Amino acid sequence: MYFYRHLCNICFIFSASFFFVHIATLAQNNQSNSFSYGDEIIIGSSAEASNLIPMLSSDSASHEVSGFIFNGLVKYDKDLTLIGDLAQSWEISEDGLVITFHLKKGIKWQDGTAFTADDVLFGYETIINEKTLSAYKEDYFQVKKAEVLDKYTFKVTYEKPFAPALASWGSLVVLPKHILEKEDINKTEFSRKPVGTGPFKFKEWVPGQKVILEANDNYFEGRPYLDGVVIRIIPDPTTMFLELKTQGLDWIGLSPLQYKKQTQSEFFKKNYRKFKYPSFSYTYLGFNLKHPWFSDKKIRQAIAHALDKEELVKGVLLGMGNISTGPYVPNTWPYNPNVRKYEYNPQKAKELLRDAGWQDIDKDGILEKNGKKFEFTILTNMGNTTRIKTATIIQYRLREVGIKVDIRSLEWSAFINWFIDKKRFEAVILGWSIGLDPDQYDIWHSTKIKEKELNFVSFKNQEVDELLEKGRRTFDIEKRKQAYYRIQEILAEELPYIFLYVPDNLPIVSARFEGIAPTPIGIGYNIEKWYVPKNLQKYRIQE
Amino acid sequence: MLNYLSKKSLELLITFFGITLVSFFLINLAPGKPTDAVSDLNPRMTPEIRAIYEKQWGLDKPVHIRYFIWLKNFSKFDFGRSFSSDSRPAWDKIKERLPITILINSISMFFIFLIAVPIGIHSAVKPNSLSDKLTTVGVFVGFAMPVFWLALILQLILGVWLNILPVSGIRSLNYENLSWINKIFDSMRHLFLPIFITVFGSLVGISRYMRSTMQEALSQEYIVTARAKGLPESKVVYKHALRNAILPIITITGLSVPGLISGSVIFETIFAIPGVGQLLYQAAMARDIHVIMAEVVIVSILTLFGNLLADIGYALADPRIRVK
């Protein structure tokens, strides 16, 4: 669950490979023996990584790079279930308080040292250390005790059962003890030349220009077919697209316009393959529920009926997305398809508004109640054209039912500190990135409404509070599913947000790469299985 | 002269501390904290973790105390560490970006003078001629054209359609394997567009300035004298008039010294050049105080130094200033 600011402007290459989700996978592909080793892939990234120690960075650019280098004990599989990565297996005790991991044997760090349970304990102790500046500490503060039982067995005990706990044992907390033991984690050189266990190892970082990785010959899942990965930093999306046209890049994320209109030529059909799948994020119109008008559910429902979500998807995303009905991505296990939907029906919207006492008495086209006109402001962040377009279409549709909307876009920090944190807004258009675990306690729980907390719309619902608590306290996926299904029903009825749309990720990859298999979590998860037939290989690593 | 210099230097020192003080407080007046980039709307960020961050960075202290801490560290030439998650020393981050920025800016400035000065002279010598009008229109077109638009169009034509220049970056991917002569050639190809666009957009200032000072010089009585004693026109223009007219231009050169290290966000972003401009922009957006202050210090020192040079130049040229 991360706030994302520049929806279409940024190249979201691996936005689905969320943090601890590792690029690697067990998926073996042995139907053919035409695999050939060699070649490199050049990836375009709009931002430069900042810190390659996963627990210290919170920017996606850093996690993209460190994802190639590090593994976790567990990782998400293609169907969003957790499977072992460095761990062979694990047991969860009956009461859900103890998790015991059994690690795979014979795995080596890229410098040749053996990987053991001590490295996991070291990672855990580092992240909970007061001095370590990590934004991910909270999950590990829940741990009561962490122990190394033997070289390949690691046991954690929790105070209370905590469902997101299992996923937290991903790549955030596996660090090479033998290298970092005597270093200050916040200042170490390791953050710019890391050593991991992953399919690719770090080779060079040219500041502001590129990061170069090369294949790890001793990778425990087998050496990747590609010799290397180069991440080139190109901040401007248009320049990135021009680079693609000159074939200086092999993989970038497209904007809807580029996907639909600018990549239809013969050149692109011949040289590239495009992919399309829902991103793990959604855009919403959120109301300040403390505001006297929007505290009335009828009003929120009327507005929902006045908006045409299909139109937003078509107009803003050029059809490259899906309408959203709740805070989960369609076709993932927590997603409930059968919640109340609000069809586009301006007549019904008007009726609902009239029931709530809003009428156009002076015939100027704007509704009034007690002498006040129905006029409010939608805030959004500056520079995000997708959101501003969305606001403009909403403005037009609400005008049709007699509501006047003003749009104001604000610089990010001012927006958050002066308006969101202080709850000085009527409505906002923003988006959330969704984590792969369905726990959304921080966004919907009624205790999370203080300044700087995330339930800034001040949503309060007793049943949702209980369900959120229930959902994070059991490991039973069926029980969790029930809880999150019910939460979505309540949210669809109460409408603290009007969930608008889920944009698609639109990656484009050079056609010379084979072995790409799109799944709900994207295409990057099995990059070590991508290969280029010998006759098509383009780059060669030179020593 | 010595007296004048020491007085001047003291003034500059006070001004310098004034600049750091005002900048430091202004940055802190802006909404948001340096740690916001990590903590804002981040569900994992509990108040306790936020407090850990603020304590580690010393943000829990009041702003005037933080200014004195900054000043103390600065006196040891320590600019502090960047607040971004790399936590690198602010000076290191700037240092690695300075060479490319200085290179592009000095080459650009060289060409700006090389082209703009003759244009200005020519326009002044033959005012309202066809060539004067053409060059005037030309330099104004360059000035009026949005940098990002021109850059994209040239990238498209020269980079994509004709495929004769690289679209972005400062080096090819195989740069390390090139011979030294090809390395230079490779760098030239990459730098051509950014420099061309900077130069084209900046000709107007110097050329118009040159034109007006030259016109003024040409209308002086000593020019009439020179012509009257039968000197050839070229000598009148290039020896007598130009020498006087170019003095103010040299002053401008002094004042553009700080411009050498401040990069342009726009063309650095479009051409993917890892220069100072991008860094400063990101630092400003992220309220990365230490990086901003380091940049403020460098720019203000260079500005003040440039001013001092200009003052000394005037003092040397004009005795009246020295007396004051």
Image (cartoon, rainbow, N blue to C red):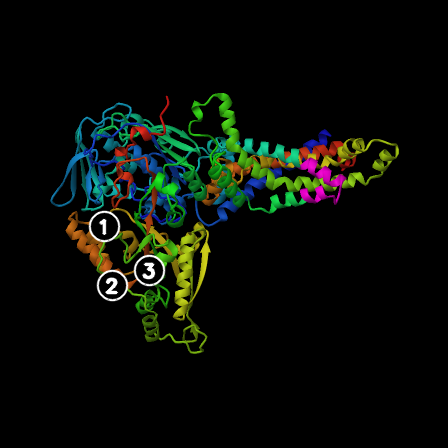
Considering the numbered disc 2 on the image, is that residue within a helix, a strand or a loop?
loop
* Residue with the mark numbered 2: A340
First-in-chain label (1 vs 3): 3
Q: Is residue B119 magenta?
A: yes
Contact (Cβ within 8 Å) of mark 2 with mark 1? no
First-in-chain label (3 vs 2): 3
- In front: A459, or A498? A498
- In front: A102, or B108? B108
- Which of the 4 image quarters holds residue A419? bottom left
Q: CA distance from mark 1 to mark 3?
A: 21 Å
- Which of the 4 image quarters holds residue A370? bottom left
Q: Which residues are magenta?
A: B116-135
In which chain is the residue bearing label 3?
Answer: A
- Which of the 4 image quarters holds residue B174? top left
* Residue with the mark numbered 1: A332
Neighbour class for label 3 at 10 Å: few (<14), some, many (≥20)?
some
Q: Is residue B138 left or right of residue A23?
A: right
Residue type (three-letter) at the residue carrying disc 3: Glu
Residue type (three-letter) at the residue carrying disc 1: Thr
Residue in the picture at 50% in, 40% down:
B157
Residue that extends furthest to the bottom in the rendered view of this protein: A361
* Residue with the mark numbered 3: A310
Residue type (three-letter) at the residue carrying disc 2: Arg
Instruction: Tell me whether marks 3 and 2 sit on the same chain.
Output: yes
Q: CA distance from mark 3 to mark 2?
A: 16 Å
In which chain is the residue bearing label 2?
Answer: A
Tell me, yes or no, if residue A456 can be seen here. no
Neighbour class for label 2 at 10 Å: few (<14), some, many (≥20)?
few
